[in-house]
């Protein structure tokens, strides 16, 4: 069973604010899933390389030349910056990082 | 087999004969979508645009709401993207529209494609058109319901652990997940990047092959797309299957499989044998560990992919936040639903310092063993068949309080994503108890979509 402190630590790493009841809920649910995945420990993988991808494509590289597929113009700029919940003119606004 | 209305072939014929115009058909579908609002299959509808010439010219389609269509809203079923306007077309969408397809609208889905019932959508659950009290499956439940209710000719979905094939099985239609790397993921809102793949949900196998012909191929915007040549997937559909070697894994017929599903699958396998296929029982010894591997690998990738939702560049921002850290914490807490939060937490834990080797690394090693099992089996067989799902469509609410029970409905589809293989779900009749559709799952070798489609076309031909 995960502890309260562990749940709070993970939530902070994952940038999720915990609401009332969340600690208990996550403790229960995560412990149940982690209990289920314990079965993997019984499988011998001592001579196995981990598989991170399935296609076998390696070092997919391209020529270091501009593609110009998305030429930046006022329309695209407006579509992109326009998504920001807080903005001023062509700029995205961010709340203060440091305390005043 | 059910009559699901227009197919790509019948629309193409109707347009050529002048029975209706593309605009008339589009508007007819728009009216139908409006009439069937009770299903909650669509999250938004689009306006008519003159179609391009091509193999899908004038065909009205529905698109899962995690694919970007320029200038329109894409929510991915989440509140956090409620007002997100796509700045460009996903490659799959650009290819579809270049082939002449029309977009009727965007379909409802489990939030960020996380779920197996479409009950995790922030915009309400989708009803199964065959029984409104049942789920359509998920996460592409809106796309499956839209096809089954003839609210479009075909739909696109995405499949990370079964999200095309499971809802196709539950709604009695065809659902195809191509090999990983066949279809570009550029413009697909990412869930788990090593598993996600776009594919079609259609009324028949030929339509699935036609849509695949339009959307597959390498893409400079997705470096994981495969350089392999793309064949004409519709070419061999009428070929008989005499001599086709079919493997039936004993692991797919164990505990948890409902009797009525087993009956139909066994009957379909007998039928394939009568058609000249060579059936042999095979074993995939490590396949039983698939869900455990999946519930480490997938949430780990989720926790990384969903880190981009920070309340700054796009998406929901918390009005209560006073500083940057609070902007992150509160915006994400308010914007994400229960399932994304659960998976972010799980993935963050699995990747956190001290646990990485025990969870993530271990899971990726067992994943390699699962792929080796498939590779070994494919030395002796051409395709592998079994049930798509352990049961027919379950009741709404039946599994929503038990994440682990919900996850188990993907037990046969998940291994295929872990191995990257192509697979289809094709209807093979209704269960004797529930009278609901059962899906036959046909899995192929990496990049051998053509053989999977050929076998599925045979099932369709003989059983309909």
Image (cartoon, coloured by chain):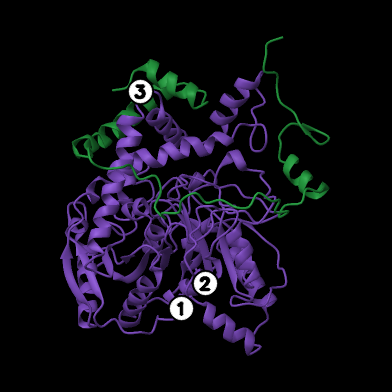
In the displayed structure, does residue B244 sit left or right of residue B58? left
Q: Quadrant of residue B11?
A: bottom right
In the displayed structure, does residue B301 sit left or right of residue B322? left
Instruction: Pick the residue in front: B202 or B377.
Output: B377
Q: Quadrant of residue B311?
A: top right
**Residue B282 position (above or below residue B419):** below
**Residue B404 position (above or below residue B432):** above
Q: Residue at x 47, y 35 (%)?
A: B303
Q: Which residue is mark 1?
A: B234
Q: Quadrant of residue B12?
A: bottom right
Label pair 2/1, CB-CB below 8 angstroms: yes
Name the quarter where the N terminus of chain B is drawn: bottom left
Q: Position of residue B31 (x, y in %)?
A: 63, 68
* Residue B257 appears anywhere in the view: yes
Q: Residue at x 23, y 71 (%)?
A: B246
Chain letter for the purple colouring in the rendering? B
Instruction: Pick the residue in front: B96 or B42.
Output: B96
* Pointer 2 and pointer 1 on the same chain: yes
Q: Which residue is mark 2?
A: B213
Q: Which residue extends farthest front?
A: A63
Density class for disc 1 (Cα within 10 Å; few <14, some 14-19, many ≥20) is: many
Q: Which residue is mark 3?
A: B354
Q: Residue at x 66, y 18 (%)?
A: B323
Q: Position of residue A76 (x, y in %)?
A: 76, 48
Q: Identify the element where label 1 is drawn.
A: loop
């Amino acid at each position: 069973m995960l502890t309260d402190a562990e749940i709070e630590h993970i939530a902070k790493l994952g940038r999720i604010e915990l609401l009332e009841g969340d600690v208990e809920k996550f403790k229960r649910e995560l412990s149940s899933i982690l209990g289920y995945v314990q079965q993997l420990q019984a499988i011998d993988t001592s001579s196995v390389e981990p598989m991170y991808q399935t296609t076998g494509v390696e070092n997919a590289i391209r020529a270091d030349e501009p593609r110009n597929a998305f030429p930046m113009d006022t329309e695209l700029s407006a579509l992109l910056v326009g998504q920001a919940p807080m903005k001023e003119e062509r700029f995205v606004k961010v709340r203060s990082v440091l305390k005043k | 087999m059910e009559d699901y209305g227009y197919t790509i072939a019948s629309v193409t014929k109707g347009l050529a004969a002048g029975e209706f115009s593309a605009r008339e058909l589009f508007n007819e579908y728009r009216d139908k979508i409006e009439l069937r609002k009770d299903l909650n299959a669509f999250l938004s509808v689009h306006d008519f645009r003159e179609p391009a010439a091509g193999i899908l010219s004038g065909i009205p389609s529905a698109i899962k709401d995690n694919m970007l269509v320029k200038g329109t809203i894409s929510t991915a079923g989440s509140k956090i993207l409620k007002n997100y306007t796509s700045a460009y077309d996903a490659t799959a969408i650009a290819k579809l529209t270049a082939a002449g397809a029309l977009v009727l609208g965007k379909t409802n889905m489990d939030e960020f494609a996380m779920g197996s019932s479409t009950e995790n959508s922030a915009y309400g659950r989708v009803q199964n058109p065959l029984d409104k009290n049942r789920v359509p499956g998920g996460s592409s439940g809106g796309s499956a319901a839209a096809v089954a209710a003839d609210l479009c000719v075909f739909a696109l979905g995405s499949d990370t652990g079964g999200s095309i094939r499971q809802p196709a099985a539950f709604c009695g239609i065809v659902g195809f997940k191509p090999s990983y790397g066949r279809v570009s993921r550029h413009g697909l809102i990412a869930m788990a990047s090593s598993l996600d793949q776009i594919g079609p949900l259609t009324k028949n196998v030929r339509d699935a092959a036609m849509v695949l012909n339009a959307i597959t191929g390498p893409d400079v915007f997705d470096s994981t797309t495969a350089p392999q040549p793309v064949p004409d997937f519709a070419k061999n559909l009428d070929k008989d299957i005499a001599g086709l070697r079919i493997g039936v894994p004993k692991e797919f017929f164990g505990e948890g499989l409902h009797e009525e599903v087993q009956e139909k699958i066994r009957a379909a396998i007998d039928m394939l044998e009568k058609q000249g296929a060579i059936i042999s029982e095979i074993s995939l010894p490590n396949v039983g560990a698939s869900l455990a591997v999946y519930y480490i690998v997938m949430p780990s990738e989720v926790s990384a992919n969903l880190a981009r939702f920070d309340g700054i560049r796009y998406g929901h921002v918390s009005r209560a936040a006073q500083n940057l850290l609070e902007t992150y914490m509160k915006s994400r807490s308010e914007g994400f639903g229960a399932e994304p939060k659960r998976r972010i937490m799980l993935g963050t834990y699995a990747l956190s310092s001290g646990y990485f080797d025990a969870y993530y690394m271990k899971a990726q090693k067992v994943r390699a063993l699962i792929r080796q099992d498939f590779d070994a089996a494919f030395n002796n067989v051409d395709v592998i068949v079994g049930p798509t799902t352990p049961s027919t469509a379950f009741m709404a609410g039946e599994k929503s309080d038990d994440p682990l029970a919900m996850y188990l409905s993907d037990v046969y589809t998940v291994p295929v994503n872990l191995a990257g293989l192509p697979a289809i779900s094709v209807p093979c009749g209704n269960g004797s108890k529930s009278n609901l559709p059962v899906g036959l799952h046909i899995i192929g070798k990496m990049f051998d979509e053509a053989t999977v489609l050929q076998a599925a076309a045979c099932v369709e031909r003989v059983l309909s």
